[in-house]
């Protein structure tokens, strides 16, 4: 068993095996806490890369470092939102609706303020020109599975799936952080050669 399987698999597999009709929020608190912990590690790695190469980080890498830290911090917060709200007695649709609204509000706020920065807009245009497939992958294959399940929860169309929708959004948010972190790591490896 790898370290990843030990940390994530032991918490995530019971959720996946339990199915939709058998959702046990108290058991799944561990999943949310585990995802928040993984996001914290990503934030730490990105900050470490930034600090150890402070003088030689170009604008694009600085934006990636900021991106990993922002995505990771967002993930920590939104992974803990249902845990905290659950302790206040919110259950079922109210819990997932409120958590999804907080998730979307934070996600859209971070995106809005990020796109207001001229250097971020310039970096996005440069990434779209340099690697259009990766750019589309990031915005379609990662952002869509984050936002669509949350919007479906807000609309209340599939109440039995709301816990799975929230978990899906969290996992894809983690994938997004991993994607940006991998760009940083590959940049460092390419620079070392």
Image (cartoon, helix red, strand yellow):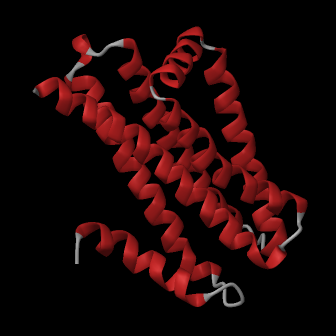
* In-image side of 19 versus 189 (left or right): right
Counting from the top left corner in percent of width and height, residue 68 is at 44, 36
What is the quadrant of residue 42 in the picture? Answer: top left
Image quadrant where one finds the C terminus = top left
* In-image side of 112 versus 10 (left or right): right
Q: Is residue 127 visible?
A: yes
Q: Residue at x 52, y 30 (%)?
A: 132
Q: Nearer the viewer, residue 49 or 128?
A: 128
Image quadrant where one finds the N terminus = bottom left
Q: Residue at x 46, y 81 (%)?
A: 13
Counting from the top left corner in percent of width and height, residue 118 is at 59, 9
Q: Is residue 83 visible?
A: no
Q: Residue at x 66, y 22 (%)?
A: 113
* In-image side of 114 versus 175 (left or right): right
| Residue 125 drawn above or below residue 111 | above
| Residue 13 drawn above or below residue 87 | below
């Amino acid at each position: 068993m790898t370290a990843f399987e030990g940390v994530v698999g032991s918490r995530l597999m019971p959720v996946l095996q339990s199915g939709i009709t058998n959702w046990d929020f108290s058991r799944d608190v561990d999943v949310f806490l585990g995802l928040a912990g993984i996001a914290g590690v990503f934030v730490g790695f990105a900050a470490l890369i930034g600090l150890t190469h402070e003088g030689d980080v170009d604008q694009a890498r600085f934006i990636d470092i900021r991106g990993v830290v922002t995505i990771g911090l967002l993930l920590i917060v939104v992974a803990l939102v249902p845990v905290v709200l659950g302790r206040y007695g919110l259950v079922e649709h109210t819990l997932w609706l409120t958590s999804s609204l907080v998730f979307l509000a934070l996600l859209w706020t971070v995106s809005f303020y990020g796109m207001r920065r001229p250097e971020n807009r310039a970096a996005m245009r440069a990434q779209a020109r340099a690697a259009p497939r990766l750019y589309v992958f990031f915005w379609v294959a990662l952002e869509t599975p984050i936002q669509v399940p949350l919007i479906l929860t807000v609309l209340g169309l599939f109440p039995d799936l709301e816990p799975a929708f929230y978990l899906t959004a969290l996992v894809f948010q983690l994938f997004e952080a991993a994607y940006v972190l991998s760009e940083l790591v590959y940049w460092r490896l390419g620079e070392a050669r």
